[in-house]
Amino acid sequence: MAKEQLRFTGSGGQGVILGTIIIAEAAFLDGKQVAQSQSYGPEARGGMCKAETIIDDKKITYTKVELPSLLLSLTQVSFDKYVKKIAPDTVIVVDEEINVPERLYAKHEVLKLPIIKSANEVIKNKMAANIISVGAVNEALQIASVKSLEEAVVNHIPKGTEEMNKKAMHLGAQLVKDARK
C-alpha cells in the first residue's frame, strides 16, 4: 500500500473527526501504521472542522498531512478552503450538493455522492453521514478490510446502533461502486 494522507472536512457536529479516528483504527487493526490529528474553530458545533489521518505500511516519521491523497468535504465552505492545497492526483469525495469546479475533473477522480441525503432518507439518521463517508473513503482507496472497518465502527458508536451504522458504512461503499460504474 502506498502512503495515504486523508483530509476530512466539514462543520463541527458532522462527525468528521470521528470518521478519521475510525478509518485510522481500521487500518491499524489491519497492521498498518497510522497517525491522526484534528482541528476545528472555536465553535464546537457549526464551525469549520478538519481532521487528518496518515496511513502507511512503513513507520510514519512526519505526522502532518501536506498534500492529501484524498479530500472528503461535507460542506461547501470547507471544500472551498481545503481544495486549494491538494496533490495532483488527489481523490475528491464530496457530498452531491457541493459545487466542484469543472477544472478539477480533468486532474482528479471526483466522487460526488449523496452522503447527507442518504443519511437522512435511507438510514433515517443525519448523524450517519460520517459513517457513510467512512465507508465511501475506504471503498475509494481500499485502506482497510471490511471486517476491520466494521470492528472500528462498532467500537466508536453508541450501543444499540450497531446495525444502523454497519448499514451506513456499507451504503457508503456502495455509493462509490455505483459512482465508478
Image (spheres, helix red, strand yellow):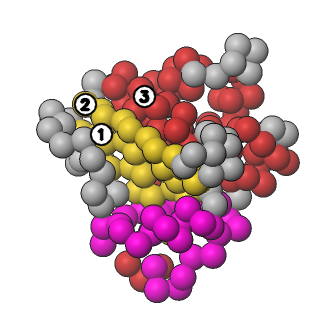
Q: Is residue 95 magenta?
A: yes
Lower position in the chain sequence, tag 2 or tag 3: 3
Q: Which mark is residue 33?
A: 2
Establish if 72 lies above or below 151. Answer: below
> Mark 1: few, some, or many residues within 10 Å (few <14, many ≥20)?
many
Q: CA distance from mark 2 to mark 3?
A: 11 Å
What are the residue bounds of the magenta stretch?
76-104
Q: Residue at x 63, y 40 (%)?
A: 44
- The x, y position of residue 140, in whole percent, is 46, 52
Q: Residue at x 55, y 62 (%)?
A: 78
Q: Nearer the viewer, residue 99 or 150?
A: 99
Give the amino acid type for the residue marked by disc 1 in the picture: Ile
Q: CA distance from mark 1 to mark 2?
A: 6 Å
Residue 106 found in image quarter: bottom left
Q: CA distance from mark 1 to mark 3?
A: 10 Å
Lower position in the chain sequence, tag 1 or tag 2: 2
- The x, y position of residue 48, in whole percent, is 58, 54
Lower position in the chain sequence, tag 1 or tag 3: 3
Q: Is residue 168 magenta?
A: no
Left or right: residue 139 versus residue 74 is left
Give the amino acid type for the residue marked by disc 3 in the picture: Ala
Give the amino acid type for the residue marked by disc 2 in the picture: Gln
Q: Does residue 112 appear in the picture of this structure?
A: no
Q: Nearer the viewer, residue 67 or 148?
A: 67
Does dot 1 land on a helix, a strand or a loop? strand
The residue to which callout 1 is attached is: 55
The residue to which callout 3 is attached is: 26
Q: Residue at x 62, y 56 (%)?
A: 74
Does dot 3 land on a helix, a strand or a loop? helix
> Mark 3: few, some, or many residues within 10 Å (few <14, many ≥20)?
many
> Mark 2: few, some, or many residues within 10 Å (few <14, many ≥20)?
some
